[in-house]
Image (cartoon, rainbow, N blue to C red):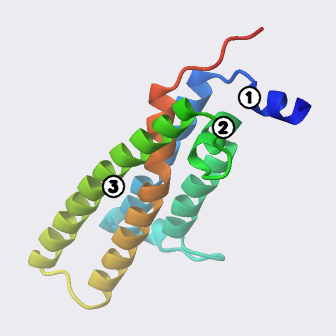
Amino acid sequence: MTTTNNQSTLKPWSPLYARTLGALALIMPIVGALLYHVDGLSDIGQARFFISVRGAFIMASLASMLFMPRAFLRILDSKGVADEHELHRRATTFHTAYRLTILVALVLIVIAASAANDGLGGKDMRHLLVTIGSMILAYAMIIPFNILAWTMTPPDEE
């Protein structure tokens, strides 16, 4: 019985922390892609240590989601939802995230098409498609966390 009470009372969290972490996670894949594909910066972005710098930025943005408040992880996890309000919040979050992910995917595909029309071919085009594919997958995971960061309010401290 005490475990149910402990799960229902979540610790307060800082909206500034969650929103800053979400904004960084949104920006980091873009920075990684620009470092990899912009001519003046491509030496930095394509440098390989374990993975390319582009990949490191995208992986770091995904890893930063692990530091989001526990309330977000609980709502987005299918096993952790306790009440109808959280079920509704999860459903609306995923519905909105799905729409935004489709929009992001379309924008990135248009960017790839315009790059292909500018004479980008062969190996460079394959690298651009890998970057766009990894950004779409990353944003599909990052967008729900950002929606919760900007729409949820922390529980009151007691």
Is residue 82 at least partly visible in the picture?
A: yes
Residue density around tag 2, few if under 14, some if 14–19, many if 20 or more, within 10 Å: some
Q: Amino acid at mark 1?
A: Ser
Q: CA distance from mark 1 to mark 3?
A: 30 Å
Q: Residue furthest bottom?
A: 122
Vertical arrangement, residue 50 with respect to residue 144, above or below:
below
Mark 1 element type:
helix
Q: Nearer the viewer, mark 2 or mark 3?
A: 2
Q: Amino acid at mark 2?
A: Ala
Q: Residue at x 53, y 30 (%)?
A: 85
Q: Amino acid at mark 3?
A: Thr
Mark 3 element type:
helix
Q: Residue at x 20, y 64 (%)?
A: 111
Vertical arrangement, residue 156 with respect to residue 124, above or below:
above
**Picture quadrant of residue 4:** top right
Query: Is residue 45 shown left or right of residue 15?
Result: left
Q: Nearer the viewer, residue 137 or 132?
A: 137
Q: What x and y, as percent, mark residue 130?
A: 38, 77
Query: Is residue 140 shown left or right of residue 25?
Result: left
Check if mark 1's residue and mark 2's residue have beta carbons within 8 Å.
yes
Q: Which mark, residue 82?
A: 2
Q: Which mark, residue 101?
A: 3
The quarter of the rendered structure image containing the N terminus is: top right
Q: What x and y, as percent, mark residue 43?
A: 45, 71
Residue density around tag 3, few if under 14, some if 14–19, many if 20 or more, within 10 Å: many
Query: Is residue 148 shown left or right of residue 111?
Result: right
- Of the residues under marks 1 and 2, which one precedes in the sequence? 1
Q: Residue at x 21, y 58 (%)?
A: 107
Q: What x and y, as percent, mark residue 82?
A: 66, 37
Q: Which residue is denoted by mark 1 in the rendering?
A: 8
Q: CA distance from mark 2 to mark 3?
A: 27 Å
**Picture quadrant of residue 124:** bottom left
